[in-house]
């Protein structure tokens, strides 16, 4: 069974009846995640938001197996959710056994019974601040209707995030996201320094910064700020 556009329309109508303004943002996100899961023939759905080190952290999930996506992608620094987040585009993996894009992640994911993933970046102010994703324990051909459905739920989640960030409501989630947005500027500056100094691509510069932070057991934003200060002082 696959999702139909009629089903998506009905689900969005039902979600539209919820008074998101009268509930916490976290509760609203959980409603979206559980509805997303219900719409797909999948084994899990969830939403991740970036932290200050641009790691994707689970905010809401419909199944404990979704936790594996966070753990494995942070550990191996690769995966479909990371690509969706970094490249700001929908990423589909129909069968991780045959997909060669993320060799470290895929092997570990298969061991934990994650076989297929569809991930959509969560937009905010021309940036990606997180990902909405669904996963399957079995190979799963993602249909165009299914992709449109995930994009629809992503847009709804983005509206909630925008409302949270622009309103006066202060929450732990809002604070986490604000730190991520603040750190992004510093990290982008550091990437620019490495691109200028070493002729690296943007992705290679980012991976070099992350590798240094992991090796020195320091935060990515701290390493980035130090590099920017050093470049500014001519050291």
Image: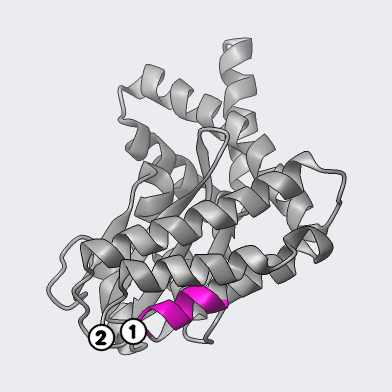
Looking at the rendered image, the disc whose residue lies closer to the viewer, 1 or 2, is 2
Q: Where is residue 34 shown, x and y percent of the image?
A: 55, 78
Which quadrant does the C terminus fall into?
top right
Is residue 70 visible to the viewer in this orientation of the structure?
no
What residue range appears in magenta? 34-42
| Callout 2 crowding tier (Cα within 10 Å): few <14, some 14–19, many ≥20 | few
Q: Where is residue 227 shown, x and y percent of the image?
A: 57, 28
* Of 94 and 144, the residue lying toward us: 144
**Relative to residue 7, is residue 1 depicted above or below?**
below
Quote the CA–CA distance across marks 1 and 2: 6 Å
Is residue 64 visible to the viewer in this orientation of the structure?
yes
Q: Which mark is residue 1?
A: 2
Q: Is mark 1 on a helix, strand or loop?
A: loop
Work out whether mark 1 precedes mark 2 in sequence or the reverse, and give the earlier one: 2
**Relative to residue 150, is residue 181 depicted above or below?**
above
Q: Are marks 1 and 2 in contact (CB under 8 Å)?
A: yes
Q: What element carries label 2?
A: loop
Q: Is residue 36 magenta?
A: yes
**Relative to residue 143, is residue 176 depicted above or below?**
above
Measuring 28% from the left and 69% from the top, which residue is drawn there? 104
| Callout 1 crowding tier (Cα within 10 Å): few <14, some 14–19, many ≥20 | some
Q: Main secondary structure of the magenta part?
A: helix
**Relative to residue 3, is residue 229 depicted above or below?**
above
Measuring 28% from the left and 84% from the top, which residue is drawn there? 110
Q: Residue 41 carries which label?
A: 1
Q: Where is residue 153 shown, x and y percent of the image?
A: 48, 61
């Amino acid at each position: 069974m696959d999702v139909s556009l009629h089903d998506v329309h009905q689900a969005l109508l039902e979600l539209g009846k919820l008074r998101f303004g009268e509930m916490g943002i976290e509760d609203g996100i959980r409603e979206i995640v559980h509805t997303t899961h219900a719409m797909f023939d999948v084994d899990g759905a969830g939403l991740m938001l970036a932290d200050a080190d641009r790691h994707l952290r689970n905010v809401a999930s419909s199944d404990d197996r979704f936790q594996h996506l966070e753990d494995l992608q942070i550990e191996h620094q690769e995966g479909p959710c990371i690509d969706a987040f970094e490249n700001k585009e929908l990423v589909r993996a129909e069968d991780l056994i045959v997909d060669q894009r993320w060799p470290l992640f895929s092997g570990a994911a298969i061991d934990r019974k994650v076989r297929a993933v569809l991930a959509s970046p969560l937009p905010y102010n021309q940036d990606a601040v997180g990902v909405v994703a669904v996963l399957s324990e079995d190979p799963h051909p993602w249909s165009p209707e299914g992709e449109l459905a995930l994009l629809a739920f992503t847009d709804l989640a983005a509206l909630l995030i925008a409302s949270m960030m622009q309103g006066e409501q202060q929450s732990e989630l809002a604070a986490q996201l604000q730190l991520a947005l603040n750190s992004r500027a510093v990290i982008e500056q550091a990437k620019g320094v490495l691109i200028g100094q070493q002729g690296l691509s943007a992705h290679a510069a980012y991976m070099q910064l992350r590798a240094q932070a992991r090796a020195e057991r320091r935060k990515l934003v701290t390493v980035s700020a130090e590099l920017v200060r050093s470049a500014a002082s001519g050291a």
